[in-house]
Amino acid sequence: MKHTEKNTIENVILDLGNVLFCIEEQKTYTQLAALIDTNKCPSDWKNNYFIPHIHRYSNGEISTVLFVNGLIRYAKNHVQALDIIEVWNSMLLQLHPEALSFLCAHHNKYRLFLFSNINDLHYRKFQKIISSICSLEHFEGHFAKCYYSHLIGRSKPDVKAFEWVLEDAGIQPEQTLFVDDKWENTQGALQTGLQVLHLEQPCDFISIKNKLFKAEPE
């Protein structure tokens, strides 16, 4: 049975957090909530300030200093910058044990790309964590190109961000699989014509391998 062109995968765009690298976002948000003084926060603080503040930081629109100071502004009196940074980075756990072997097994079969919503603090912490296993250059060497939101000024699930990445990479969406752990990001990718795989379980390499295997020509 021949596979249609629609199902052919030549390129794979991978997310970083909970696809290749283990994270626990709720850990950070729970600890951060304990540092915030609710008496300093307006009723719409979360939606009108906190979430947009994180978005601007992830897009590289504000510096780390402005990001941290913007949270200290609403923090309890004893909270210092290092407290914010420690809690903010606490969600980052480890490079998944299977990540490098997966990348090694597939980077010669597909053009691999990395597209991550990340920020300066997390990017630097990520480098430090994986340094005990490999260098950043070795890790990124498995990809044709890496796209980090804070460096390119664009983030998921914005459709325009996906369109920009596709154009910059010079790849066709119908020949490209996008893998992410967040449903809303896969929905943004679908609007560009990308094939998508939503990982409902963190770092589910079996699902990724099965998807790629089914797309291979017989």
Image (cartoon, rainbow, N blue to C red):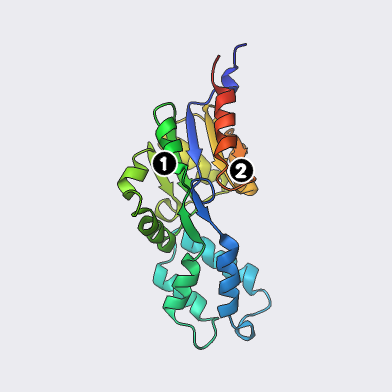
Q: In the visual, does 7 lie left or right of 134?
A: right
The label nearer to you, 2 versus 1, is 1
The residue located at (39%, 53%) in the rendering is 151
Q: Mark 1 = which residue?
A: 100
Q: Residue 214, percent across and down?
A: 59, 24
Q: Which mark is residue 69?
A: none
Instruction: Out of 18 and 194, give the one closest to the viewer.
Output: 18
Instruction: Out of 75 and 153, give the one closest to the viewer.
Output: 75
Q: Residue 176, percent across and down?
A: 52, 31
What count of labels does the image hold? 2
Q: Amino acid at mark 1?
A: Leu
Q: Amino acid at mark 2?
A: Leu
Dot 2 lies on which element?
A: loop
Quadrant showing the N terminus? top right
Q: Bin the neighbour count of mark 1 within 10 Å (Cα to Cα): few under 14, some 14-19, many 20 and up.
A: some
In the rendered view, would you say 132 is above or below 45?
Answer: above
Q: Mark 2 = which residue?
A: 199
The residue located at (60%, 63%) in the rendering is 26
Q: Residue 207, percent across and down?
A: 60, 36
Dot 1 lies on which element?
A: helix
Q: Bin the neighbour count of mark 2 within 10 Å (Cα to Cα): few under 14, some 14-19, many 20 and up.
A: some
- Looking at marks 2 and 1 on the same chain, the residue that comes earlier in the sequence is marked by 1
Instruction: Out of 215 and 7, give the one closest to the viewer.
Output: 215
Question: Going by the picture, which residue comes out furthest to the bottom?
Answer: 77
